[in-house]
Amino acid sequence: MHSVKLESILLTVAILAPVEIFAQSLETVPPGFIISGNQIIDPAKGSKVRFWWGYNETDPSELFFVVSARAKGYVGIGFNNRGGMKGADMVLGWITSNGTVIFEDRFGNTDFSAPVVDKEQNVKLEMAKENATHTMFAWTRPAKTSDTSGQDLQINNEMIEVLWAYTDEDPVGAPVMHTERGHMQLNLVEKHPTLGKP
């Protein structure tokens, strides 16, 4: 899998997804990011969620992520060293009917309840888009955060569980039970210029 410029991967999204999805988002994405991997992370459940990962070319300590889901509610991505939601470092985002973007750094306190808002927000939303079929978010975060609460996973050159979840409708108030969820093992920095070195 070759590293590619972020602009190329977003153009690919625009071509592959129906209803001319997100092509107009290119000017909102910061330049200089390298996408080093991508994966459909729900192959057994309809192949509706694709996830990209990479890094800032000028500051590789900053990681970059994109998720696109065929869903109209919230989309969640989490990182954990185990398969469950307990202890997961997560982001959860949705776009309301009036266009308001909600995107939060969250933490899984248990396996069976909605993740709580992280005490320290260590993610930066770079782009949010929704059309008639898909919801898409792009965000950055440090590979090694300064979070002292223990609610962030420090990302190293190893396989981790990447959790995903989505709903078909926006939550009203607190996030509701997911429509679908799952997880897949991925190494997010294997091709990173510094973190990927043995």
Image: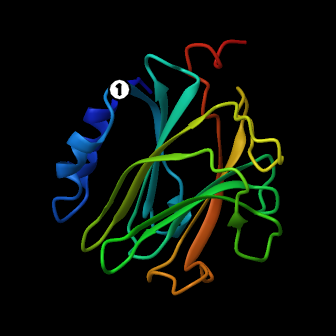
Query: Residue at 61% across / 13% down in the picture?
Result: 194
> In the picture, residue 169 is in which quadrant?
bottom left
Q: Residue most toward the bottom?
A: 172
Residue situated in front as seen by the camera: 181 or 103 = 103
Q: Residue 187, relative to residue 49: is it above or below? A: above
- Which SS class for mark 1? strand
Crowding at label 1, few (<14), some or many (≥20) Cα neighbours within 10 Å? some
Looking at the image, residue 193 sits to the left or right of residue 1; the answer is right
Looking at the image, residue 89 sits to the left or right of residue 25; the answer is right
Question: In which quadrant is the C terminus drawn?
Answer: top right
Query: What is the total number of numbered labels drawn onto the structure image?
Result: 1
> Which kind of residue does numbered mark 1 sit on?
Val
* Residue hosting label 1: 4
Residue 60 percent location from the top left of the image:
53, 20
Looking at the image, residue 197 sits to the left or right of residue 96; the answer is right
Query: Residue at 22% across / 58% down in the picture?
Result: 21
Residue 166 percent location from the top left of the image:
52, 71
